Image (cartoon, rainbow, N blue to C red):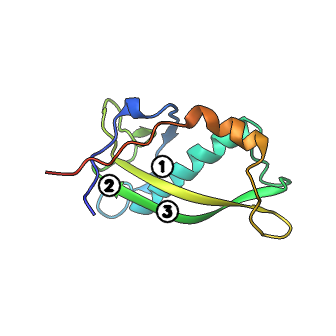
């Protein structure tokens, strides 16, 4: 599998600034790879909560993560603010990743036949046309 090229800021219809923390840095002086996943998770869940599509305490449908992946391109480090995994002033992503969710009924833990309308509405503004991954030279 070819390594993808880093995405550009303009590839994303939404961006959220996240403040890095002292504890995010590892012994090598940059944000540890596992922290990037918390950046993804924080951004996605904040978007859904702000639009009323996710009620973590009482929602009848919940999303379970069944797959994740991440490609790393450049280091980030405390005290940099991070916006959608872009360092300040950078147009290419320091990392990019994906989460695959399966939405299930909270009580039964069984998959739902279709996504709730509120979730569909919240996700619609984020849809972009799929782009084939560019191959590295």
Q: Tag 1, which secondary structure?
A: loop
Between label 2 and label 1, give the one nearer the viewer: 2
Distance of label 3 from label 1 (alpha carbons): 23 Å
Q: Which residue is under mark 2? A: 72
Which element is circle 3 on?
Answer: strand
Label 2 vs 1, first from the N-terminus: 1
Residue of label 3: 68
Above or below residue 128? Residue 133 is below
Q: Would residue 23 be seen by someone viewing this image from the given angle?
A: no
| Residue located farthest toward the front when viewing the structure as drawn | 113
Callout in the foreground (3, 1): 3
The correct choice, above or below, for 49 with respect to 99 in the image is above
In the image, is 137 to the left or to the right of 81?
left
Mark 2 vs mark 1, CA separation in Å = 19 Å
Mark 3 Cα within 10 Å, few/some/many (few <14, many 20+)? few
Residue tagged 1: 21
Q: Quadrant of the N terminus?
A: bottom left
Name which residue lies at 33% across and 64% down.
Answer: 27
Instruction: For mark 2, give the secondary structure.
Output: strand
């Amino acid at each position: 599998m070819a390594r993808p090229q880093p995405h550009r800021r303009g590839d994303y219809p939404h961006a959220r600034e996240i403040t890095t923390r002292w504890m995010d840095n590892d012994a090598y002086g940059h944000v540890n790879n596992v922290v990037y996943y918390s950046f993804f998770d924080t951004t996605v869940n904040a978007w859904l909560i702000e639009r009323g599509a996710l009620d973590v305490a009482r929602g009848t449908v919940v999303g379970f993560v069944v797959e994740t992946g991440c490609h790393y391109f450049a280091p980030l480090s405390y005290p940099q603010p991070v916006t959608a995994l872009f360092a300040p002033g950078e147009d290419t992503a320091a990392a990019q990743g994906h989460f695959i969710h399966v939405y299930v009924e909270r009580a039964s833990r069984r998959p739902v036949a279709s996504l709730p309308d509120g979730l569909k509405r919240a996700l619609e503004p984020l849809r972009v046309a799929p782009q084939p991954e560019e191959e590295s030279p």
